[in-house]
Image (cartoon, helix red, strand yellow):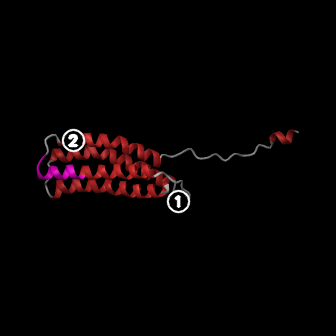
């Protein structure tokens, strides 16, 4: 699979799940009143920073590369593809599950559990995001120096 396809798919996934999770939490608190004030504040303050960081890195990458062709891309191995999709999908599903469970029958230690899940997955997702979206040093255009030739 080409790296650019992974970047596009994960960009869309991360951006949509970031805003989807935040809107879901807001909906459960303000419209359904299923998520209490303390759980709402904890959810936003624990999940907000990591999701915002990931989304910011991706959006910065997209903006910085707006003039580059998407056709030029390296192939990546299938193990990388598998891990790159598995971990983010699991992270989002586990977060949705924990928050949904909290609304139906409160979990003792909900805040701690949310923090542990965020920390556990955050490290691995950070590696994936860095690998795909970190800006590499641009290749320098070397100019020929003819000054030595003029002296001779």
Q: CA distance from mark 2 to mark 1?
A: 39 Å
Residue at left 47%, top 51%? 77
- The residue lying furthest to the front in this view is 78
Helix, strand or loop under label 2: helix
Residue 70: mark in rendering: 1
Quarter of image, res 146: top right
Q: Position of residue 59 (x, y in %)?
A: 43, 53
Q: Is residue 124 left or right of residue 41?
A: right
Magenta residues span 96-106
Q: Quadrant of the C terminus?
A: top right
Q: Please give the name of the residue rendered at 29% of the width and 57% of the height, measured from the top-left corner.
A: 20
Q: Which residue is mark 2?
A: 113
Q: Residue at x 14, y 45 (%)?
A: 107
How many callouts does the rendering have? 2
Q: Position of residue 65 (x, y in %)?
A: 52, 54
* First in residue order: circle 2 vs circle 1: 1
Q: Is residue 122 magenta?
A: no
Return the mark for residue 131. none
78 and 8: which is toward the camera: 78
**Does 31 sit left or right of 49 as displayed?**
left
Q: Secondary structure at mark 1?
A: loop
CB under 8 Å between callouts 2 and 1?
no
What x and y, as percent, mark residue 115?
25, 40
Tell me: 150 left or right of 107: right
Given the current orientation, which residue lies at the most extreme left position?
Answer: 105
Packing grade of label 1 (10 A; few <14, some 14-19, many >=20) is: few
Q: Residues within 10 Å of mark 2 (few under 14, many from 20)?
A: some
Image x and y of residue 72, in percent: 56, 57
**Chief SS of the magenta region:** helix
């Amino acid at each position: 699979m080409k790296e650019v396809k992974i970047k596009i798919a994960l960009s869309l996934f991360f951006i949509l799940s970031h805003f989807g999770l935040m809107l879901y939490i807001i909906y459960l608190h303000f419209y359904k009143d299923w998520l209490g004030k303390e759980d709402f504040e904890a959810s936003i303050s624990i999940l907000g920073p990591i999701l915002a960081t990931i989304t910011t890195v991706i959006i910065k990458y997209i903006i910085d590369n707006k003039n580059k062709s998407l056709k030029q891309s390296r192939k990546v191995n299938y193990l990388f593809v598998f891990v790159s999709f598995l971990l983010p999908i699991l992270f989002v599903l586990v977060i949705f599950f924990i928050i949904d469970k909290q609304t139906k029958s409160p979990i003792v230690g909900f805040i701690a559990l949310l923090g542990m899940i965020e920390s556990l997955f955050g490290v691995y997702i950070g590696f994936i995001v860095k690998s795909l979206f970190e800006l590499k040093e641009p290749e320098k255009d070397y100019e020929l120096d003819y000054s030595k030739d003029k002296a001779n």
